[in-house]
Amino acid sequence: MRFVFKTLLVSALMCLLCAGMALATDITRECLVTAPGSQSAWAKAADGRYDSAWTYKRQQDCVLTLQAPPGTREGGLYVCFQTEPEEMAVKSGGREIYRRQGAGLAHRYVPFAGDEPLTLELRGGKDGVSISEFRVFSGAQPPDWVQRWQSPLTRADLLIIVAHPDDELLWMGGAIPYYALERGKRVAVAYMTCASRLRRSELLNGLWTAGVCNYPFIGSFRDASKNGVKSVQAAWGGEDKAAAHVTRLIRQLQPQVVLTHDLRGEYGHPAHIVTARAVLKALEASADARQFPDSAAQHGVWDVPKAYLHLYGENPIVMPWQQPIAARGGKTALQVCADAFEQHRSADPIYKVVDYGRYSPTRFGLYRSLVGPDVQGDDFFEHLNERE
């Protein structure tokens, strides 16, 4: 089946031009595509919605071909998967320009050069493969909202560990944009749960908007929060399983600073509480090779220099998230965070990113320090030396 497919433009997250280089234009509607199935089925990949998708259900290879309009000399494919392929290859006129095996990258950008037809070869897993968003661009520099993810960090300066997508924005405030964009720190974000593939796309959109360019760590714990702390602990396989997961992350990334939830779960959310407890247990375990020895054998041990908890009453610190972020046109860290939260369109609309109130994301406490107490009181990295 060969057809020209139409698309709705995704709202741009940012409209800045790169210095000396015009942004690429969306030419999706001008492209000829061959794809298995009907035209109406493929249209779901180009309708501007992450909750609909073109799906190929077979556990075998499928092939899509694309012909850009005449005159296209360079550009890129932006593919957002609802169900990721076991393997993806892109060929330009028979010459391979991209190959990736395994899942773990839901949004992918593949640049191309020349006007030869492109071929996408996708190998489906047990659930097949599905594409929720598909875009084609002409030009060397894609719009800023197009995500070009780098591999997950192997070393982090700041590790933020939260229960669910959007918690890193609601409760940790401007930490991501301030430290990632303004301070140039390596910021890793880890989620214990992700309830759906829609939520995964939203969290990626949010993180990219906030300034994260290394793919996050998305846990596989089930989002079971309706029946209290014990219910969450049981659903997560017990306290030790959650703590082992966090310990592995800490040993792998060797962060200078760890940041996580309020011990009371902000407004009492049991998954937030279980996450905070797992982090505290992991902070003690990560330096002891006798605890969770499998990850110690793989990554070695690590004693985290500093750890902060949201709303922690001891050694309090109030973070000034009103700093302007040069990379975001002078918007404050909190404003950038609010823009990022808007990408979580399926989230409860009662929540807002604000710097006031009982659960203000500006208020933290220093839970652990190997470098002495904070004096300045407005920097998670106080007393820590810069490192390569």
Image (cartoon, rainbow, N blue to C red):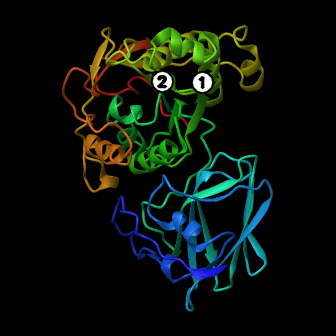
**Is 343 placed above or below 31 here?**
above
Answer yes or no: is residue 27 visible: no
Asked whether, in this view, residue 137 is left or right of residue 300, the answer is left
Q: Measuring 63% from the left and 56% from the top, which residue is drawn there?
A: 130
Q: Distance between the residues labelled 1 and 2?
A: 9 Å
Asked whether, in this view, residue 191 is left or right of residue 358, the answer is right
On-image quarter of the C terminus: top right
SS type, badge 1:
helix
Q: Are marks 1 and 2 in contact (CB under 8 Å)?
A: yes
Q: Measuring 40% from the left and 69% from the top, which residue is drawn there?
A: 9
SS type, badge 2:
strand
- Kindly identify which numbered label has been placed on residue 258: 2
**Is 271 placed above or below 98 here?**
above
Asked whether, in this view, residue 41 is left or right of residue 334, the answer is right
> How many marks on residues?
2
Answer yes or no: is residue 97 visible: yes
**Is 108 placed above or below 205 here?**
below
The residue most toward the bottom is: 70
Q: Measuring 44% from the left and 15% from the top, which residue is drawn there?
A: 273
Give the camera-side residue of 188 and 128: 128
